[in-house]
Image (spheres, grey):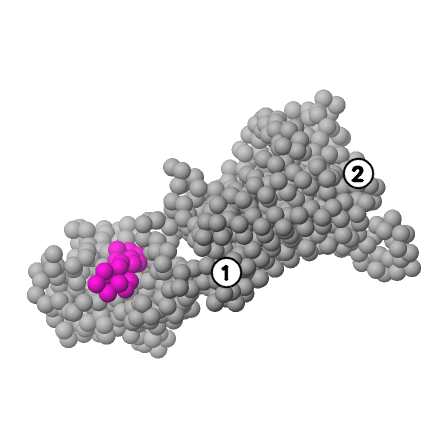
Amino acid sequence: MKDKIFGVLQRVGRSFMLPIAILPVAGLLLGIGSSFTNATMIETYGLESILGEGTILNALLTIMSSAGNVIFDNLPLIFAVGVAIGMAKKEKEVAALAAMISFFVMHICINAMLEIQGDILADGTIAEHVLDGTITSVCGIQSLQMGVFGGIVVGLGVAALHNRFYKIQLPNALSFFGGSRFVPIISTITYVGVGILMYFVWPYVQEGIYALGGLVTGTGYFGTLIFGIIKRALIPFGLHHVFYLPFWQTAVGGTMEVAGQLVQGGQNIFFAQLADPNTVHFSADATRYFSGEFIFMIFGLPGAALAMYRCARPEKKKQAGGLLLSAALASMMTGITEPIEFSFLFVAPMLFVVQVILAGAAYMIAHILNIAVGLTFSGGFLDLLLFGILQGNDKTSWLLIIPVGVIYFLLYYFIFKFLIQKFNLKTPGREEDDEETKLFTKADYRAKQGATAAGAASQAGDDEKSILITQGLGGKKNISDVDCCATRLRCTVVKPELVSESILKATSPSGIIRKGQGIQIIYGPSVAVIKSNLEDYLETAPNEEYIADEAPEENVAQIRTADKEDGTKNETEDTHTGGKVKKVLCSPVLGEAAEITEASDEAFAGKMMGDGYIVRPEEGMVYAPEDATVSFVFPSKHAVGLLSDDGVEYLIHIGVDTVNLNGEGFEAFVKDGDRVKKGDKLIGFDIKYIKEHAKSDECIIVFTSLQEGEEIRLAKAGAVNALDEAAEIITFN
């Protein structure tokens, strides 16, 4: 149960990354626009002729500020769509559309309830008995003040409906509304009910939110310390987004009236004050949830990097230096800390404990010193420049970050150096002589795997990193979900025991996190490209499990594939002889039978889908070779799946690359779920048309439920009539 909860929270946390990714751009527009149109700043620096009201630059900057503002004003809708996209497994664009529709439906239903109950009067004004701030305008609709939570409720709910129904099959009369078209329909109906329900439920939720926020905000500086420690401690689990987002974006992080409007959430309060020319000093109570990050991200962690470099062995300093320098720069400039944190997290956990305590204290120190510097994504120099330096010390007290930062640099440096030397911690550059600073490289792994990995690469025709990641995660069949956040590839697997860290390390990650079925591989900012490449590879990868075994005699990992979707095994041993006939198989087609290794398609010839045989047809008709149930008929009618009465599953595939014909030249006589008798017509096909428009017309019969120790043996090569005995299932068990 805990593992399942972790997997769900991991997916929820990473789904927040899409809407969060727009905030740096919005903040950039708002920050630059507001900073250079601020009347006080213009007057202070004598820039009236360049930036004063009525100038072209002032107009352009005002537009930029408005463009950034509109994003922050509509974050609930952005989160609804973004979370739905992040949580949807396939056809994400449908989930996005359904989320947007559901968002409006939910709020218009809440609006209707408010009017029916007399909370909103006929003239559109709010009744006197309604508490100020509980009703607001959401995309022009007067509704309850749900903030980003409202968007998250829609995003998560629509994603759940989408994943459940996007493949639904309806009766023939309603078939047009089946599949992905059904998702917006069911979502709309559902969120009519949710809107009505929210009218009664949300006021109690709102009270709970205020109470939770008060627990941190009401405990003053100590509450800030606890917030900082918890947030940094959740970094290894990838759940920090789930924790801090409510403090940034909802009433949990406090409320404040800015320019006559009630604003919720620490980050929203800061940007509302940023847009308000009357702001004298930004609220440190609002920025307590992020101002401290500048202290340890720009100063502290680079001090830790220097300590690890100074402690590296002389012969490995150059290699470790390059690794640590890039990690330190990432932390300083962008606030992305995973590269440096994960360089010591797994090899020296006590250093991470120190990091959590010092980082948590930085939040509190910034709060105590009234430092109020905002940010969009993380506490790097770019955000410090925009929302600290350019806003002026009078508004932000940003200058205090420098002396505190210098102290933090020294604290990190000396504490890390002392602990590394005292306990001989294996930080980068301190590995044993026979270990590299990066534990494995692709070349090392491929040398160990020899022909096996090379063969997989040649078969797949895709990049090696994607192949190794797939193998390390236990094969395509073992991977149920793939996504990423800013720095990590986040995967969910079916069987955690099939995951091989030794294979994953061959892809040069910064670290690997395993928690039940949730696997996180840290690659840094390039992870989005890695994820995209992996998804492309998985589209065509064989649907099988991949098991890595150690051979003690050779001390070399021997990779074998097992437990395919079809239950077969890729044989690497010598061809078996003998065996016992388990079942006689009849040909579904009139033509010339041959071994499956002669198939024109490399995937079939390599038995990636399973063992079987082929028939080069002389008649354009496929017959049921035995009594069976039709498992499926492909929409393009070029293939049909059967389940025999004795439990044997197999696929009859007509032609090679015929899926691209989109059903032209085919006629299906059966549909999913039909019962057929031996000799019944299944699919008719035009041999001439297929030969002219596809790679081959050969019919491939693949058995997808063979057990280990079973194979297909051709009983009659050459001419074969439909329903003649053509092959046999041989067992060696």
Residue 102 position (above or below residue 591): above
Locate residue 262 relative to residue 590 in the image: left or right: right
**Which residue ends up furthest to the top in the rendered image?**
129
- Residue 724 rendering spot, x and y as whole percentages: 12, 66
Residue 689 position (above or below residue 424): below
Which numbered tag is attached to residue 312?
Answer: 1
Q: Amino acid at mark 1?
A: Ala
Q: CA distance from mark 1 to mark 2?
A: 54 Å
Which secondary structure type mostly characterizes the magenta part of the structure? strand
Locate residue 282 relative to residue 605 in the image: left or right: right
Q: Amino acid at mark 2?
A: Ala
Q: Residues within 10 Å of mark 1 (few under 14, many from 20)?
A: many
Residue 255 position (above or below residue 71): above
- Residue 597 rendering spot, x and y as whole percentages: 23, 72
| Helix, strand or loop at mark 1 | loop
At x 23%, y 61%, the residue is: 551
Report the magenta residues as a range.
544-565
At x 54%, y 65%, the residue is: 322
At x 37%, y 50%, the residue is: 493
Q: Earlier in the sequence, mark 1 or mark 2?
A: 2
User: Could you say which is closer to the camera, residue 646 or residue 361?
Assistant: 361
Per the image, is 270 magenta? no
Q: Quadrant of the N terminus?
A: top left
Task: Look at discs 1 and 2 and give the one toward the viewer.
Answer: 1
> How many numbered circles does the render carry?
2
Per the image, is 558 magenta? yes
| Helix, strand or loop at mark 2 | loop
Q: Residues within 10 Å of mark 2 (few under 14, many from 20)?
A: some
Q: Which residue is mark 2?
A: 259
